[in-house]
Image (cartoon, rainbow, N blue to C red):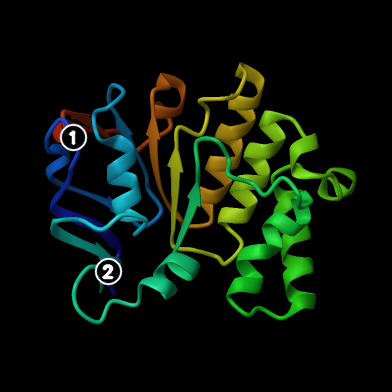
């Protein structure tokens, strides 16, 4: 059984009026099942593009992505299944649907994957409770809750279809220090469920919880650290 998310020689170039911009340049790395891997680097270094490539929100120009034994780039790759079932995404600005309640935001990925309605609700309630969103907040509209609460709802939504991989883009970028501490607890709980977590961050506090730390600059991984 394959126990590793593997990225090999991944590249992505964007065209612009000023010329081609290589956002990701021959990147290779891995993260094992149940590990937290953090990618750190300055703004514009390619961190978010790399995360979007792993999540199949962008298509690479070259390279390979193997998700626990499944090639997600080659011919025959079922990208719809991968996006809905294998990977969960927590965006920097949450991307919750403002006109939906917290509960409805979490049930949405399940409805898109044809999960029975009764199961959708019970699982959403469980996931939200697990990240500290009580029954009152579950009924609140997404635009009426705090930044820390939105982040927790976003994590619950990302976990709705029980993915193998959780991808997080600057998850503490819009949080105060207390909310960041709560976020770290949420990440630890997800990790304890055996999920692989890949985080793009500027935060040294978030990076400190990782087993693997990668540094990226100008689209290239410069170094890797591993900590037990």
Residue depicted at 29% across the width and 36% down the height: 47
Residue depicted at 59% across the width and 47% down the height: 155
Quarter of the rendering occupied by the N terminus: bottom left
Q: Residue furthest front?
A: 17
- Does residue 30 appear anywhere in the picture? yes
Q: Residue 50 appears at what percent x and percent y?
A: 27, 44
Judged left or right of residue 35, residue 22 is left
Quarter of the rendering occupied by the C terminus: top left
Determine which quarter of the picture holds residue 14: top left
Q: Is residue 214 above or below residue 15?
A: above
Q: Secondary structure at mark 2?
A: loop
Residue depicted at 63% across the width and 80% down the height: 114
- Does residue 228 appear anywhere in the picture? no
Q: Secondary structure at mark 1?
A: loop
Q: Which residue is mark 1?
A: 17
Q: Which of pointers 2 and 1 indicates the residue nearer the eye?
A: 1
Q: Which residue is mark 2?
A: 72
Q: CA distance from mark 2 to mark 1?
A: 31 Å
Closer to the camera in the image, 101 or 185: 101
Determine which quarter of the picture holds residue 33: bottom left
């Amino acid at each position: 059984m394959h126990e590793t998310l593997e990225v090999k020689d991944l590249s992505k170039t964007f065209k612009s009026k000023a010329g081609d911009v290589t956002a990701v340049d021959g990147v290779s790395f891995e993260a094992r099942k149940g590990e937290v891997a953090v990618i750190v680097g300055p703004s514009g270094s390619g961190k978010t593009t790399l995360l979007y490539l792993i999540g199949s929100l962008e298509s690479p120009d070259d390279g390979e992505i193997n998700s626990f034994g499944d090639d997600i780039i080659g011919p025959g790759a079922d990208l719809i299944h991968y996006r809905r079932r294998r990977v969960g995404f927590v965006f920097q600005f949450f991307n919750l649907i403002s006109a939906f309640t917290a509960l409805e935001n979490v049930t949405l990925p399940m409805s898109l994957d044809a999960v029975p309605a009764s199961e959708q609700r019970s699982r959403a309630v469980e996931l939200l409770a697990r990240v500290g969103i009580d029954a009152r907040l579950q009924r609140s509209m997404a635009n009426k809750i705090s930044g820390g609460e939105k982040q927790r709802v976003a994590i619950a939504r990302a976990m709705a279809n029980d993915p193998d991989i959780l991808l997080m883009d600057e998850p503490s970028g819009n949080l105060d220090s207390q909310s960041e501490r709560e976020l770290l607890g949420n990440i630890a709980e997800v990790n304890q469920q055996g999920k692989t977590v890949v985080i793009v961050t500027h935060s040294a506090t978030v990076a400190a919880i990782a087993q693997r730390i990668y540094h990226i600059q100008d689209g290239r991984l410069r170094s890797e650290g591993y900590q037990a």
